[in-house]
Amino acid sequence: MDRYRLTREPFYQPVGEECGLFHAAYARRQPVLLKGPTGCGKTRFVEAMAWRLGLPLVTVACHDDLTAGDLTGRWLLDAHGTRWQDGPLTIAARGGALCYLDEVAEARPDTAVVIHPLADTRRILPLEKCGEVVTAHPDFCLIASYNPGGSAKTLKTSTRQRFVALTFTYPEPATEAAIVAQESSGKLDVAEKLVAFAQRTRRLARHGLEEGASTRMLIHAAQLVGQGASLRAACQMAVIAPLSDDEELLLALAAALDAVA
Amino acid sequence: MPSPEGSSPGRRLTAYLALLGHPDLRVVPSQSDDGPRPVLMGPEVRLPDALDPELAWAAVAHAAAHHAHPREPWSGDPLKPVSRAIIGALEDARVELLTSARFPGLGRRWRAWHTATPADGGTFEALLARLGRALVDPAYDDPHPWVQKGLGFFFADDQRRALACPEGREADWRRIAGRLGHDIGQQRLPFNDRTFVVTPAYRDDHRWWWPPEVDPQPQEAPSPPDAGSTEDPPLPIAEDAVHRYPEWDHLISTLRPAWCTVRIRLAARGSVPEPPPGLAGRTARALGLAGVRVRRFRQAEGHDLDLAAVVDHALHRRLGLPPDDRVHQDVVRRRQPGALVLLVDASASTMGALAGGGTILGELLGMARLLGQTWQGPVVIRGFRSRGRHDVELVDLDAPGAVLDGLGSTRLGAAVRHATADLARLPGPRRLLILTDGRPHDIDVHDPRYLVEDARHALATARRRGVTAEALVLGDQGRAQARTLDHLFRRGSWSPLRRLGDLPGALVRLMA
């Protein structure tokens, strides 16, 4: 299990009551759903919680080709015959880890159903193919994240209602600037300028931009500034260019950057 | 710069306004009486087609500056033309300087267009342009006493940093303009109000400040006028019956929020002719083709190997278990009827007669009836017609014997948005089928592309939400018409037909 343990404490800046609420949910082993836009700190929050609880963390990036076997495990052939290989969900359930299903809505609804027996009071994982029923370790807990705005896909009601949910959003400007400065080891005034620009981009939802600049993007930009790039070039490379492929929006974003710089 | 049809510059500039903090403003093309200047009117920034792109950015930013630093309305007391021109320059400089403090890049952008110098001479227009430049460009020094006097009134300090009148109060502007105007009069400098043009060219013509002598703003129609016959009494309104939906304006690429009012009404009762015998069976068979493609794994036969099954096959042999020979995969169309919403076009044009007798609407209603009877899943049938954006009617045709007359126009986008919302409440695969005789139009819209683009947008949104959106179009489809319908409904998502009897064939073309 040790290879799933974090080796150093991740930086996480609480923005509200989320840490206390997570601990309360974990105390009762309630599965937790984290909702929020991309790059606002959901994954980092999970890492911080795993560190504070002293638990290993097994992360699965969900996608629409993910099968139930990819989560639970499968038989493999090797030189000596056949061998059962646990999937990440089974590893976490046996070993008492936090299992983090990143972007769980991307998984096909029928795949997501395999977590159901683990996510309610049964806390078991039936492995149909090898005829075993795994009872979850007492420390095991399930966490899932999803981005309601970034994808057309949603969760099945039966999956959704097994979770308690924490809603994440971008932090207040001062907090976000402090996070950007800390994460990039950069200057606070640079971070403040980046955050002010990001907030402008977050107003473009009605104009064809699905989501504005994320905190993660701002950290990338601040890191580029730390490497000697100008603020404008860093913003162009780390924020504007990755944000959209729409030529008109790119021109508007570049002009707005000109206005504030 | 923003071209009336494509208008991607309009979209770019509208997004720029949102980024500068003005999501409610939008850039639209100039109207015929605007002339070659930018015009501000309410939430619109109207720009001429041929405006230089760089000038357009500056003009839009200038409009944002006016909106960011609004001032109280003018009292309407008389003002001399010279004073008006001076006040215009003072007010422009005020909003630009206040805005530049937050957006230093905008100050640079604007200053690039200020090119007046003492070499331009001493006419009133030249002096005003020189004063305008000195007000916004601290690096520009103009020795003319009148310009210096203006700077002295405008700024509270010699360094030209603090504004003497940051709020731009009318009394202050009148006082300063009165004294500067008096000097112009003393020097006998002529001024022609009719030929005067505000400089630089990115600045608007200021028409929105001054109380108009005659109200130039077009009044919105106070009540929706009737498009069809007036003797039809309005149908009774169903409960929970008024909904508002946005509408897509393709010129500015923006959804106008809560733009259309949709009212749900109950249908009148009447008789609907029975469909020809045998048609129901053929329709049901055609509908059998409707379904979703499903990949089936572990099949005895198929066009591809199922690799997981092949591995399992080898595993079982090694484990000494009997192997499963079903190692193929295939794709089939699985019948999953799901929910269906039928939207029946009931605009005035559907009252037109068909060659073989009967009306288009009668035929459309017959189709809806037939589809409603043969569809296996839940069905909702609605007639739609409109009298402008304030009165889009959706008539509930679910009850047996429900009929309606064709009147008004075809505001398809609003109807599609309501149907999409209806479908969202229903489980399983969702399908929207529009029965119509052609393209959308309405009495309050003159741009023939506007409602087509709005309907396209509504259909695209429906598809993004997992709705299969298709149309059956009754009538003669010439090549030009077919191109429009390809654009509107998407190629392959609509099917033409001439009579009710063609329904099974049209469904096969659509769903196969």
Image (cartoon, coloured by chain):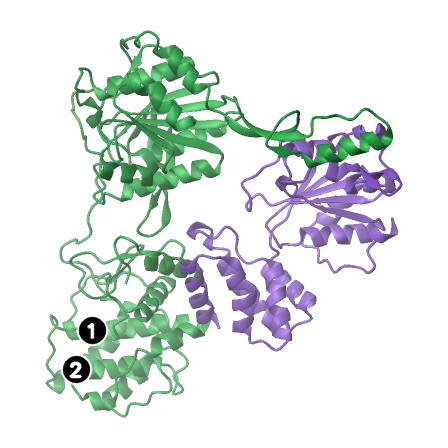
Chain colours: A purple, B green
- The CA span between labels 1 and 2 is 10 Å
Subunit bearing disc 1: B
Residue A259 against residue B45 in the figure, above or below: below
- In the picture, which quadrant includes the C terminus of chain B? top left
Dividing the picture into quadrants, the one containing residue B348 is top left
Element at label 2: helix
Q: Residue furthest bottom?
A: B143
Q: Are marks 1 and 2 in contact (CB under 8 Å)?
A: yes
Q: Residue furthest right?
A: A80
Disc 1: CA contacts within 10 A as few (<14), some (14-19) or many (>=20): many
Q: Residue at x 37, y 85 (%)?
A: B138
Dividing the picture into quadrants, the one containing residue A254 is bottom left
Measured as percent of width and height from the top left, residue B337 is found at 49, 21
Residue A84 located left or right of residue A42: right
Q: Residue at x 54, y 60 (%)?
A: A242
Marks 1 and 2, the one that precedes in the sequence? 1
Measured as percent of width and height from the top left, residue B26 is found at 34, 55
Q: In the image, which disc is placed on residue B491?
A: none
Q: Residue at x 60, y 54 (%)?
A: A170
Q: Which residue is mark 2?
A: B124
Residue B392 located left or right of residue A112: left
Q: Which residue is mark 1?
A: B85
How many labels were placed on the picture? 2
Which amino acid lies under the numbered mark 1 shown in the image of this protein? Ala
Which amino acid lies under the numbered mark 2 shown in the image of this protein? Phe
Question: In terms of depth relative to the viewer, which is nearer, B138 or B395?
Answer: B395
- Asked if marks 1 and 2 fall on the same chain, the answer is yes
Residue A166 against residue B370 in the figure, above or below: below
- Is residue A123 at least partly visible in the picture? no
Q: Residue at x 73, y 39 (%)?
A: A70
